[in-house]
Structure formats: C-alpha cells, structure tokens
Amino acid sequence: MTDFGKALHATETAIPGLVVWDVPVHGDSRGWFKENWQREKMVAAGLPDFLPVQNNISFNDAVGTTRGIHAEPWDKWVSVATGKIFGAWVDLREGPTFGNVFTTEIDPSRAIFVPRGVGNAYQTLEADTAYVYLVNDHWSPDATYTFLNLADEASAIAWPIPLDDVEISPKDLAHPRLSDVTPMAPRKTLVLGANGQLGRALRAEFGPSSNVVFATRAEFDLVAPPTWRWRDFGTIINAAAHTEVDLAETADGRRDAWAANVSGVATLARIAIENGITLVHVSSDYVFDGSLDRPYREDDPISPLGVYGQTKAAGDAVVATVPRHYIVRTSWVIGDGKNFVRTMASLAERGISPKVIDDQSGRLTFADEVARGIRHLLQARAPYGTYNLTGSGEPTTWADIARRVFDLTGHDPNSVDRVTTETYFADAATPVAPRPRNSVLDLTKLEGTGFISHSADESLKRYLGAS
C-alpha cells in the first residue's frame, strides 16, 4: 500500500550519488496524486539538476518479472507509477566503490536517483507494475553501456523471488560476472587550445589520460564543431583565445578577436548547456579599466578599455549563462614559450638595458598555477561562478619584475630604465591597446575554496632556475 503524506526527503546510500527519495503522495478514496518530477523543489532539496530529456515507462504484467543489471552513460530518476519493485543497484564505475551494492523496495511514494555508470535492476513484487524512469540523454546505439549478471556471486543480491522461478530475458542471463566487467570510465574532459602556454601547462597538470582529450585550434573548429557524443564529456576547459591585445585594435585583429573570444565561446556555451557539461573559461584583468585603488573583486563592474578587453568581457557574459561554469580571471600570465620574463632574461644576458613600463601594477601568474587552480576548482566541486586566480604576494610593476629578472640572473638590476606607458609607446608605428593601470586581483574568494596561490616571486625564481 502506498504511504501517503510523507515529506520530500533524501537518504544517501553506500553508493556515491545514489540517493533514495521519499516523495509526497496525496490520496483519498478516489486514488492518489504526486509530483513525480518537480525540478524547483527537488533541486532545492539537494537533487542534482540533471536536465532530463526523455521519460520512459516499462509495464510488467506478472509478479517476479526481473530486468537488469544495466549501467548506462546517463543519469536516471527512477520511480513507480503503480505496483512495487525490489530494486538492486551495483556501482560499475571506475574507482574505490566499484562493486558496491544497494537494494531497497520502491513503491509510488519512493524514488531513487541513479547516477551515470551505476548498474540498475529490479524485480516486480506486484502485478501490473509500471516502472518509470527519466533520463538526461537520448538513447543511442553509439553509447557505451556496462552490464552485470543478475546472479553474480560477488554481488550476492538477495532477490526476493529466486531467479530460477522468474521471467528473465536470455540477454540479461548472459551478462558477465563482476570480475569480467569493464568499469565505466568517468565523463571525459576536453581541453581546447592545447598547444598554447596554458594548454601545455594543463597537459602537464592532468598528465596522460584516456579520459582527457587535448585539442588544438587546428583539430577543433569552433565554427563547425565536431559531432561527438557530447554527453560523454563532463568538462570543457577553454584555454584557447585571441590574446594579441595590440593586434586586436586593427581591423583584421578586431574581427579575429571577436570570432575567437565571443562567437567561439558562444558555441562552447551552447554545447555545454545542451549536454550538462561544466564549462571552464579563462578570462582576463583586461575586463576592468584599472582605475580602482584596491584589488579588483569578482563582482566589481566591468569596464574594458580596448577591443581585447571588450571581447573577453563579452565572452564572460556568455559563459555566465551556462548553469555549470567556472570563469577563471587571471593576469600577467607567464608560461612555456615567448614571454616577458624570457625576453628580459635574454636582454640581460646580451647586456642590453631596456626601458620598461613602471606605472602598471599587478602580479605575475605562471601558467602552471592557473592549471593547478582549474584542477582544484573541478576536484573540490567549488560553487560555480567567477574566481580570480593569480600569483600571490605584493603587487609589482613591469619594471620591478624586469629588475628582479636581471638580479636573479646575475646582472645589474639598475640597467632597467623605468618609464611611463605613454613614453614607452610614444613612437609606436601600429595601434596600441589601452592597458589597465591596476591589474591586481583579489584572491579571497578562491582562497575560500581551499586554494592558496604560490608566491609570484618564488614562482619567478623557480622559472629562472634561481631557487
């Protein structure tokens, strides 16, 4: 008999992410009514916002009808419309809980959220049982499924009715034992811009893995993205961007910057929204005008000065529409390849005394630090949103950094001549992008997630091999 009047309530199980829910059912002499899926209430109560796209019903005539154990590459919300089932779930995902088993009975007043990769099976306990499940992907013959034998000895499921006495399909009887099951891999991570300085740092941070796909600009066309099974991806890290700030002030550069930093990002946002993917997007201090006399916080109003900053601000606004997103705002990035630090070290080695800007303040951020921070946000499941991520320590000017490079490489720091931005670009023959004078970003929000940035100066020492 259906239990009426229960409050909406969640009960965790021994399988991570597998959660049993008590569902309010309202009944009288005429019958009963329930909200089988009510997104606003259930998400507020802690159910993942899993974005279902299909609703299926399996009707079972006889007591003892048994189906499973099937693990699909999507999440499911399982309930019963009429009748009752004995349900069995086995964790078939890669990881330490592989093989964990949970069983319970489900009637119209109970439901269960089944995460991707958890094997699902049931046995009917009443005739005319209607088994209902919402899924967040459409069935596809190209999807990867994992199966387990209903009679697997290691799982030792205590079926109420012996399997020899019930109706089972030959296909379900032929599934492998647990020892022969290939675990379902986690959803993949796609890293775009894999040959850039941040892309190379992300390669080093994540290491070789069949579950991380690295794509260069040549391999992934944002105008016509590949028709992959996007539901197999859990995260997209966008490390690709048009970053030539001065070139962006030209006619061709402006077009290219908007194409890469806005139109391309809009394509990624659409893919992420449609497929429940977490989108990680790297932003810039150039979204601010640099006029504040304190470090910029994530919620400060944006006010970009030039085309590059405008495109990054527009891209941020697009990414913010994705339900699962991280906007990682950084500044003065130094990585593998041509950069300011290497240029200064080369000048010092050749005995050249450079003129370096001394009226722009910020902190160096090394690409491996950005990669480490991105991985932290994902692994810690930090609240979605925007986070500042730079090196830590006292702010410096570009001239300060240049002098520090000269000093750390054994050369006279006084060889660096401090100049204003106006003086430095006075004789420029091509357009020059306006720069924010204050690029210092407040790190409090990121630190609240448990991530502490390395000192910019200590990172500089390591980069130059001086520590």
Image (spheres, rainbow, N blue to C red):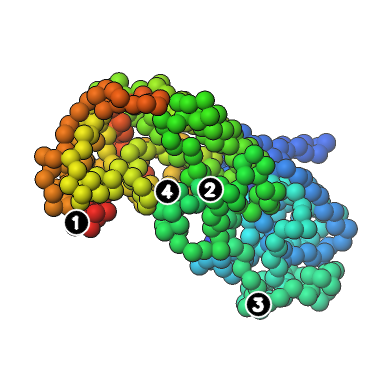
Residue 11 can be seen in this image: no
Q: Which residue is mark 2?
A: 192
Q: Around disc 3, counting alpha carbons within 10 Å, would you say few (fewer than 14), some (14 to 19), or many (20 or more)?
A: few
Distance between the Cα atoms at labels 3 and 1? 52 Å
Q: Which comes sooner in the sequence, label 3 or label 2?
A: 3
Number of numbered discs? 4
Picture disc at residue 91? none
Q: Which residue is mark 4?
A: 198
| Residue 287 on image: x %, y % | 41, 27
Q: Amino acid at mark 4?
A: Leu
| Residue 384 on image: x %, y % | 48, 39
* Residue at image coords 75%, 58%: 142
* Residue at image coords 22%, 34%: 356
Mark 4 element type = helix
| Residue 307 on image: x %, y % | 46, 25
Distance between the Cα atoms at labels 3 and 2? 35 Å
Distance between the Cα atoms at labels 3 and 4? 40 Å
Q: Which residue is mark 1?
A: 466
Q: Amino acid at mark 3?
A: Asp
Label 4 with label 1: CB-CB less than 8 Å: no
In-image side of 412 versus 179 (left or right):
left
Q: Amino acid at mark 2?
A: Leu
Q: Which comes sooner in the sequence, label 3 or label 4?
A: 3
Q: Which residue is mark 3?
A: 180
For residue 464, above or below residue 323: below
Foreground pick, 54 / 247:
247
Q: Amino acid at mark 1?
A: Ala
* Residue at image coords 49%, 64%: 208
Distance between the Cα atoms at labels 2 and 1? 32 Å
Q: Which quadrant would the C terminus be assigned to in this image?
A: bottom left
Label 3 with label 1: CB-CB less than 8 Å: no
Distance between the Cα atoms at labels 2 and 4? 10 Å
